[in-house]
Image (cartoon, rainbow, N blue to C red):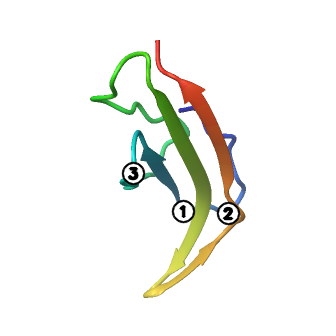
Amino acid sequence: VTIGKVTGATKYEIKYKQGKKWITKYTTKTTYKIKKLKSKKKVTVQVRAMVTSGSNKAYSDSAKKSVKVK
């Protein structure tokens, strides 16, 4: 997953599913490699930027895309 840099974001939330269960990961980088996906199956990926200040969190709108794994 390649994420466009968001000014002021402290990290990015990446949610993905290949079936019924969503898996959530966090990264501070603008690239993230999703592992253990089943080939020739559809995966849905949702990404949004986060800003954290102490215990407070603010999220951007999310971008969602479905693709077929090779």
Q: Amino acid at mark 3?
A: Lys
Figure check: 32 above or below 58: above
Q: Nearer the viewer, mark 1 or mark 3?
A: 3
- Secondary element under disc 3, as helix, strand or loop, is loop
Q: Return the residue at label 1.
A: 10
Figure check: 52 above or below 23: below
Classify residue 22 as left or right of residue 57.
Answer: left
- Kindly identify the residue that appears in the image at 39 percent across and 43 percent down: 19
Percent position (x, y) of residue 27? 43, 50
Classify residue 66 as left or right of residue 52.
Answer: right
* Mark number, residue 8: 2
Percent position (x, y) of residue 31? 51, 34
Q: Amino acid at mark 2?
A: Gly
**Which numbered disc flags the more N-terminal residue, 1 or 3?**
1
* Mark number, residue 68: none
- Secondary element under disc 2, as helix, strand or loop, is loop
Q: Are marks 1 and 2 in contact (CB under 8 Å)?
A: yes
Report the residue that reaches farthest toward the bottom: 55
**Which numbered disc flags the more N-terminal residue, 2 or 3?**
2
